[in-house]
Amino acid sequence: MPTVSEIRSLRFDPRMTDFRLLQGLCTEADRLVEAYRWKVGLGPGSPLIACLIGGTGTGKSTLFNSLAGKKISEVGMRRPCTLKAVLLVHEQFVQGIQGSPYLDDGTRNSVTVVSHQRLDLSPLVLVDTPDFDSVEAANRQIFESFFVVSDLVIYVTSQEKYADRDGWEKLVRAIQWGKKTICVMNKVTSDVAYRDFEVNVLKLDRTIRPVRVEKVDHATECIPGLRDRAPFSDLFGHEVQDSTAAQTRTRELEALRTHAAGTLERLEETIGKHAERTASVNVKIERILSDITREMEKGLDAVVTQDIEIQIRDRLKTLLRKYDILFVPRMMVRNTILRVFHSVADMVGLGNGPQTPEDRGRQIRAEDLRAARSAAKLEPLQTAVAKLNLQIAQILSTDPGLDDFRRVARDDVVRWEPGKVQALYDEAFPGVEHLLEAEFNRFREGLSRTDEMKLYGSYTVWALFLITAEIIVGGGFTLFDAMLNTVIVPFIPKWLLNVKVVDLLREIGERVDRAHRDALHGILTSQADLYRTSFSNMVPTGEQTDRLRRLRLDMTRRNQ
């Protein structure tokens, strides 16, 4: 079963509009699930946890001491008076109570546990909580933790503070939660004030009649006879261990589980809403990408003109002169001399080994491949990238509901300039180089070894391969198809025509065109993916949300 750490591991981008809500839901869900598991582990015979809650100066500590029957919690004029929780626990339950991670803030200074051996107090764990209206965040955190784990809430107010909004909201929360609740108005001097408080409480719950505690003229640490008054008298003694206490404990566990499942559901729904926003934005980006890709495609095919035809013819002549039938003999003589030189150098320890004809051939072909790469027509891609960035910025800036996406795009997404586009294309082009190399080697291996044209003509084929690649990346397959019969074929030796080199060139041209366009599409898509990935990373991964869902379903099933 998923663990509570799955909740703590959830991470949200602080720039999100709902960041505070999500963080709060995570904290609350973690607190509730942890509290539920801990309370289940206490077992059915564990004492009820009765928490006294109240604002600053309401006299909680005095009531706590009165219920305990002696001074346990400090009473004084300093505000807030209770700076940490004080627990009164029978010694046989101390270990179990101290096992709760929510009874400590990590410093071991948030809780004081006072153990005792009194049987009359054994059915209860009495807790004097810090003031919930404390200016200290740590005090409010301690209060929240004990509120969650409590089985019974003793709400304490005073004549001066009973109308305070903060305190009233805490009382309403306890009653709506379903916790067994006792209300106390302390320091009473006015019948009108008490009656007003009583009427309002009865409106919330007809079964709750507030306990009235009169104001005393002198400072006191205990109120005599308080624990003998109803409903406190029902909390002490062995009778509290009957079915009523068991029902209270069971009901509170069910309520705790329900709240945990509900908070997990709200967390899941909030994450889901943001995921829907992300999906909606990414759909818009996909549409922009699709439209711009079509525009880019239209700009890749060059228009056949006389100037272009002359340029291609001149370039082909240059390549054929370089790879003419004299190139191979010259290269063989040069490599023979180099081989002898390197052999002598190796003998005297100066060389790194001879360079074979194949090595030299690959080096020369690599130089021409770099030249072919530089012929690529990247202006349509560079324009498309700029348009993509502009249109995404427009949809993010015109919708106030997408301000968080706009901030993420501004901070995290690198918008590629033409130089970066060129570098990315250069990285993608080696795939085309490997394609030409493989086809060239395959062609040579297909020639008969007794055919002397393999030696003198195969490099003519390489020149044809190069011009094919240059035309494709510079003007598209349509331009190549138009130039093939009118410009290229007249320069192809008859013997190569007989081995169907034209068909091979057309096949290679189609493959180079696909690879070239795939590289352009990949670069444009990668720019769009920078946005989509950044937006998707604002919330937990699908795997994390799946674990959260399983945790929520597990808590829900326990309610059924």
Image: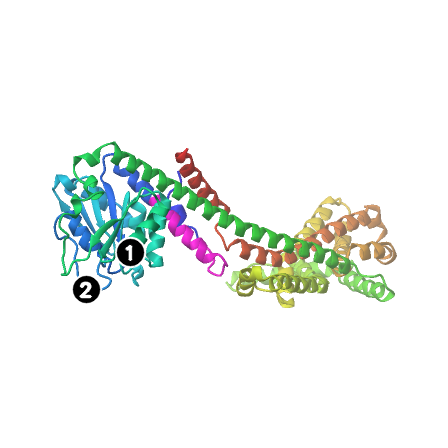
Q: Please, which colouring scheme is shown? A: rainbow
The residue indicated by pointer 1 is 192
Distance between the Cα atoms at labels 2 and 1? 27 Å
State the residue in front, 221 or 317. 221
Quadrant placement of the C terminus: top left
Task: Please give the name of the residue rendered at 81% of the width and 57% of the height, measured from the top-left corner.
Answer: 479
- Residue 226 lies left or right of residue 507; in this view the side is left
The secondary structure that dominates the magenta segment is helix
The image shows residue 310, relative to residue 549, as above or below, that is below
The residue indicated by pointer 2 is 77
Q: Is mark 2 on a helix, strand or loop?
A: loop
- Disc 2 marks a residue whose amino acid type is Met
Please state the horizontal and vertical placement of residue 497, each as a whole percent of the image: 84, 49
Please state the horizontal and vertical placement of residue 235, each as a whole percent of the image: 21, 41
Q: Please check the rendered image and state whether residue 17 is part of the magenta-colored stretch, yes or no.
A: yes
Q: In which quarter of the image is residue 424?
A: bottom right
For marks 2 and 1, give the one nearer the viewer: 1
- Residue 449 lies left or right of residue 153; in this view the side is right
Q: What element carries label 1?
A: helix
Which residues are drawn in magenta?
12-34
- Disc 1 marks a residue whose amino acid type is Val
